[in-house]
Amino acid sequence: MTVAAPSGGHSPNPRTLLLGEVARATQRLADAGVPSPRFDAEELAAFVHGVRRGELHTVADADFDARYWEVVARREAREPLQHITGRAFFRFLELQVGPGVFVPRPETESVVGWAIDAVRAMDVVEPLIVDLCTGSGAIALALAQEVPRSRVHAVELDETALGWARKNVEGSRVVLHHGDALTALPELDGQVDLVISNPPYIPLTEWEYVAPEARDHDPQLALFSGEDGLDAIRGLERTAHRLLRPGGVVVVEHADTQGGQVPWLFTEERGWADAADHPDLNNRPRFATARRALP
């Protein structure tokens, strides 16, 4: 794979070389099947040249950095954009990410938005929140930031992912725990106001259909969960019921193809009320919520 794309001639405008290279990179990424080729080409150009995406036109031709084509080649090979730049944006956060940790997705932002609204609607001065399968810490940090008086605990089993989470939560109010989400935090049983999770939910049978960025780079532990993809959520249903106070709320992300299945795991017989599904910004079923039934 080539990592150089020489431009022909000299531009009469001393600030158009980079924009032309971005256009070429966009076409290369599109040909490689990258879902957002223009955005990624611009983001990589901004990263290499130390400017914002909206400032690319300010980079003089003489300052063009040929390393741009090296990172374009990596993205062309479907290495995640966030692994190349080392950062991911989530709601109002900029997170450190890289190999070994799940890269937070835009669709999870609507999950967190619902959870924030639910917590704010509670008549609780200092709400107690638990984020299970925290990964990079994105969900926990967003809740801590946007619900200022909340007490947020985050749980992660994988040691590599935990390392990234530690970097991100440093200096925040999030308390990070190394442990299994299914047995975590027994000391908080019956006290938690909100349990939230973006667990693994891809069926093992869907492996070949997963985008290369996720399949080849995200940790398998964060992606796959049994033949139907619901094994982790079945376990989290019991954990959430154990942790929540009566009236407390659980929020669990799932695949858009699982919309008709997940709410049925939170039944009245198992101590739940108000189980429901909710759409993401593209109006696809994205997450389920339920309330622990009152005695």
Image: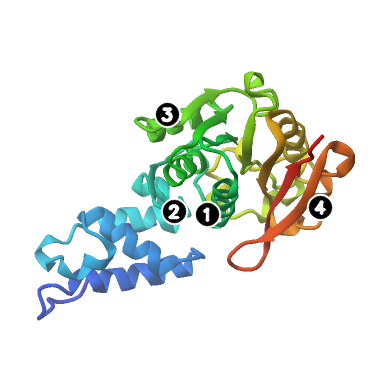
* Residue located at (9% from left, 64% from top): 62
Q: Which quarter of the rendered picture does the N terminus lie within?
A: bottom left
Mark toward the start of the polypeptide (1 vs 4): 1
Q: Is residue 49 left or right of residue 198?
A: left
State the residue position of label 2: 91
- The label nearer to you, 4 versus 2, is 2
Determine contact: label 2, label 3, CB under 8 Å: no
Q: Residue furthest top?
A: 187
* Residue 120, label in figure: none
Where disc 4 sits, the SS reads loop
Q: Quadrant of residue 232?
A: top right
Q: Is residue 75 visible?
A: yes
- Residues at marks 1 and 3, CA–CA distance in whole angstroms: 21 Å
Disc 1 crowd rating (10 Å Cα; few below 14, some 14-19, many 20+) is: some
154 w.r.t. 253: above or below: above
**Residue 16, x across and y down, in percent:** 18, 75
Question: Mark 2 is on which residue type?
Answer: Arg
Mark 1 vs mark 2: which is more N-terminal?
A: 2
Which amino acid type is shown beneath numbered disc 4?
Answer: Gln
Residue lying furthest bottom:
12
Q: CA distance from mark 2 to mark 3?
A: 19 Å
- Secondary structure category for the residue under label 2: loop
Q: Nearer the viewer, mark 2 or mark 3?
A: 2
Disc 1 target residue: 109
**Of the pair 28 and 159, the residue shown nearer to us:** 159
Question: Is residue 262 among what the camera can see?
Answer: no
Q: Which of the two discs, 4 and 3, labels the residue nearer the N terminus?
A: 3
Give the amino acid at mark 1. Answer: Glu
Distance from the alpha carbon under mark 4 to that under mark 2: 28 Å
